[in-house]
Amino acid sequence: MRSSPRLVIVGGGIAGAELIRLLSNTEIEISLIEPKHQIECQALYPDYLAGLVGIDDMIAPLDDFCERSGALHISERALELDDGVVVCQRSRVEYDILVIAVGAEQNFYGVKGSENAFSVNTFEGTLHAREFIERESPDRIMVVGSGLTGVEVASVLADSLESNIYIVEMQGRILPQFPERISRLVERILFERGVSILTSTQVSEIQRDSITFADGTTLDCDMTIWTTGIKPTQFAENLRFPKKRGWLLTDPYLRVQDDIFAIGDCAWIEIDQKLATKTGIEAERQAKHMAENLKRMIRRRSLTQYSILACTENPIALISTGCGRAVGVYGRTCIPLPARLLRAVKIWIDKSIVSRYK
């Protein structure tokens, strides 16, 4: 390996940006391939939707950040890999070490009329949804999906609007990835906020003014917000590496193959029978571990194994529930702190993620 190894990072989300920050101004030659010109914090999208934060709270200029960090920002879309080269739209970028951090995309599961739904999985989609709410003042809003994003969207909208908010969940309870006692607690809070919850209900079609379920039932609505499901990006799908359910399969060192690694939502990281969640806390920890291992690599030292903190069996989250409150979850228990304090901690954490890149 060269004395100044060429590290190429594909993807400038939180995982990729954090890796750059941790390696800033080192002897490693860093190039970032990312078509966007800003770093975006998805955790703040529900708050923006409800008018609780501004655009500047959610984004940081990527070009300025890269310049300060000594990284080259290549504002192109990566297309494929070709023997030590990342093939982009207009250029070919050589690498000694490659880290793939391309995140994930919204998955509509082939639902008919999905183009009629708003998505808050992207910055642009969130802006579009907010503009619609401000312009149309929708009376009945359907939120499809009751994971973290769905619950937070429903909670903050119920708190900030006079609309009728519905959650539509295909499984038998909301927050199905969390222990049942957490689901019941949040369900009770949502009921108190006036949110209607439809569980064991599958969406088959979305119209501009209604939503149809698998049993043929149709409900009128003024807006549908889709929050459920993600899938690998096209770039990740095109890669001929081992995968699990479409996600890039890594070893305990976050390696996909040879000197190619994957972190963040695009990776399937399963170690010691623990499966890492696709969350911000894991993306940041993976970036930190990747940075330390890259430093070890250039010093010819052996890599260390990653240790998963937030796994599917031990989820960790701060969940906004409206009215300036939040529920804290660590594994199977609630964090025993006041709800307003937890909300303050959550918003501080989310905003600080963006501010560290400014």
Image (cartoon, rainbow, N blue to C red):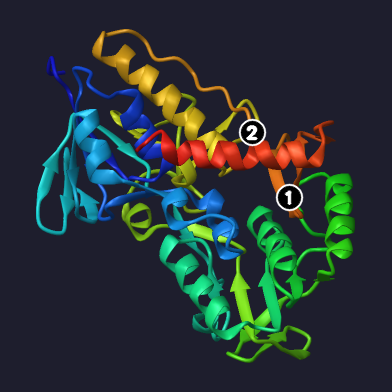
**Residue 289, picture quadrant:** top left
Q: Quadrant of the N terminus?
A: top left
Place of residue 350 in the rendered image (x, y in percent of width and height, measured from the top left) = 55, 41
- Residue drawn where x is 59% and y is 27% of the image: 308
Q: Amino acid at mark 1?
A: Gly
Where in the figure is residue 355, as x and y percent of width and height? 43, 37
Q: Is residue 198 visible?
A: no
Q: Are marks 1 and 2 in contact (CB under 8 Å)?
A: no
Q: How many other residues sit within 10 Å of disc 1, few (<14), some (14-19) or many (≥20)?
A: some
Q: Secondary structure at mark 1?
A: loop
Residue 358 is left or right of residue 345, and the answer is left
Left or right: 136 in relation to 82: right
In the image, 165 versus 291, the foreground residue is 165
266 w.r.t. 298: above or below: below
Mark nearest the camera among 1 and 2 is 1
Residue at 74% of width from left, 76% of height from top? 162
Q: Which mark is residue 324?
A: 1
Question: In the rendered view, does 313 fall on the left or right side of 333?
Answer: left
Could you classify mark 2 by the number of other residues whose Cα lies within 10 Å: few (under 14), some (14-19), or many (20 or more)?
many
For the point 12% across and 18% down, which residue is it? 2
Amino acid type indicated by mark 2: Ala
Residue that appears at 69% across and 66% down = 160
Judging depth in this view, the residue of 209 and 287 nearest the camera is: 209
Residue at the spot of label 2: 310
The quadrant in which the C terminus is found is top left
Residue 30 visible somewhere in the drawing: yes
**Real-space CA distance between mark 1 and mark 2, rounded to the nearest whole angstrom:** 25 Å
Helix, strand or loop at label 2? It is loop
Residue 177, percent from left and from top = 73, 49
Return the residue nearer the eye: 109 or 228. 228
